[in-house]
Image: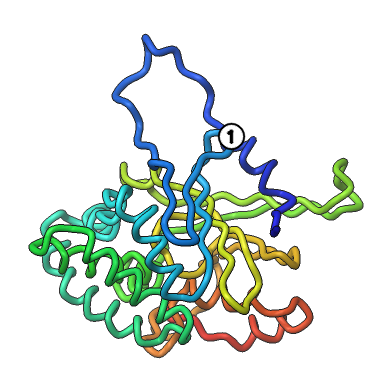
């Protein structure tokens, strides 16, 4: 069975401190432990861990049923992000344009990710009342392409940023390499409760573990079973091309995941040649 050596340590770090019941506010959100098909959602050291696997269609449906359905609140993030970056009324004006960008970008996903996203959207829409299905479909598309379409909005590109610290094995007291990273972006009052670890075992590909949010196809921070780690960091202190949005590029999380799903020996070449939309 695939195990992530650093996952246990990660879970220990993420365990929240205990709070006296007398001081606690409203009960925080918790994913309900459940199973669906070959997928399972459970808690390890108080951290939610989603395990999915199989074909892209199976992974998409497992993710929708086990994680997206109970955590639907986080899908308001794209709209909240637009309001955060400008006046609330601007979100209404920008929304149709962002949906158009997202629909176009969905066609740029590699085949296996496109199939997973399609299954995810279909299952997500089927799990809500019919009058809400279209909204959920749009929200899932926007959430999967937010890091790309934000670059099409003037003044928004620099809104997100991240940093990382790597320690070589020779300098680590553990005897192995260490990698830590943070995510420097506003939680918008929505993201905090919904973070989770996903362990994915795709058919015919490397298994991997990632830290993120439910329903995002690909990876922004994770490690595969070969021990190859990726973490997407946005850097703005360099010269950029004339436009920061490339409608012909591969959506950000998908491009990142494609890099390390392959063998480590040719990942460097893949990274250098991949073109991201954002």
- Identify which residue is drawn at 40% across, 86% down: 108
Q: Nearer the viewer, residue 106 or 65?
A: 65
The residue at the far left in this view is 131
Q: Nearer the viewer, residue 266 or 65?
A: 65
How far across and how far down the image is residue 191, in percent?
37, 47
Q: Classify 186 as above or below 228.
A: above
Q: Is residue 94 left or right of residue 61?
A: left
Instruction: Give the quadrant of residue 133.
Output: bottom left
Q: Is residue 270 left or right of residue 134?
A: right
> Looking at the rendering, in which quadrant would you find the C terminus?
bottom left
How far across and how far down the image is residue 75, in percent?
28, 56
- Identify which residue is drawn at 59% across, 55% down: 163
Q: Is residue 84 left or right of residue 59?
A: left
How far across and how far down the image is residue 262, in percent?
67, 79
* Label 1 secondary element: loop
Q: Is residue 133 left or right of residue 271?
A: left
Instruction: Give the quadrant of residue 226.
Output: bottom right
> Looking at the rendering, in which quadrant would you find the N terminus?
bottom right
Residue occupied by mark 1:
45
- Identify which residue is drawn at 71% across, 49% down: 6
Residue 154 in view:
no
Residue 263 in view:
yes
How far across and how far down the image is residue 85, in percent?
27, 57
Q: Classify 123 as above or below 68.
A: below
């Amino acid at each position: 069975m695939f195990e992530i050596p650093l996952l246990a340590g990660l879970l220990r770090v993420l365990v929240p401190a205990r709070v006296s019941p007398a001081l606690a506010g409203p009960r925080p959100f918790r994913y309900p432990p459940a199973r669906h098909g070959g997928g399972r959602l459970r808690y390890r050291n108080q951290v939610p861990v989603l395990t999915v696997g199989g074909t892209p269609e199976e992974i998409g449906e497992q993710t929708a049923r086990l994680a997206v359905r109970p955590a639907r609140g986080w899908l308001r993030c794209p709209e909240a992000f637009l309001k955060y970056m400008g006046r609330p009324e601007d979100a209404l004006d920008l929304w149709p344009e962002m949906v158009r960008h997202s629909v176009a970008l969905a066609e740029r996903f590699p085949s296996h990710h496109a199939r997973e996203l399609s299954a995810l959207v279909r299952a997500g829409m089927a799990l809500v009342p019919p009058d809400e299905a279209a909204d959920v479909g749009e929200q899932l598309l926007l959430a999967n392409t937010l890091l790309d379409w934000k670059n099409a909005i003037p003044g928004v590109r620099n809104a997100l940023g991240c940093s990382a610290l790597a320690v070589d094995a020779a300098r680590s007291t553990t005897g192995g390499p260490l990698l830590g990273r943070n995510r420097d972006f506003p939680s918008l009052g929505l993201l905090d409760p919904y973070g989770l670890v996903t362990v994915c075992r795709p058919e015919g590909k490397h298994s991997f573990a990632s830290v993120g949010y439910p329903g995002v196809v690909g990876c922004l921070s994770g490690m595969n079973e070969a021990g190859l780690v990726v973490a997407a960091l946005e850097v703005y202190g360099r010269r950029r091309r004339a436009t920061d949005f490339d409608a012909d590029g591969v959506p950000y999380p998908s491009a990142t995941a494609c890099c390390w799903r392959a063998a480590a020996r040719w990942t460097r070449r893949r990274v250098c040649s991949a073109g991201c939309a954002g």
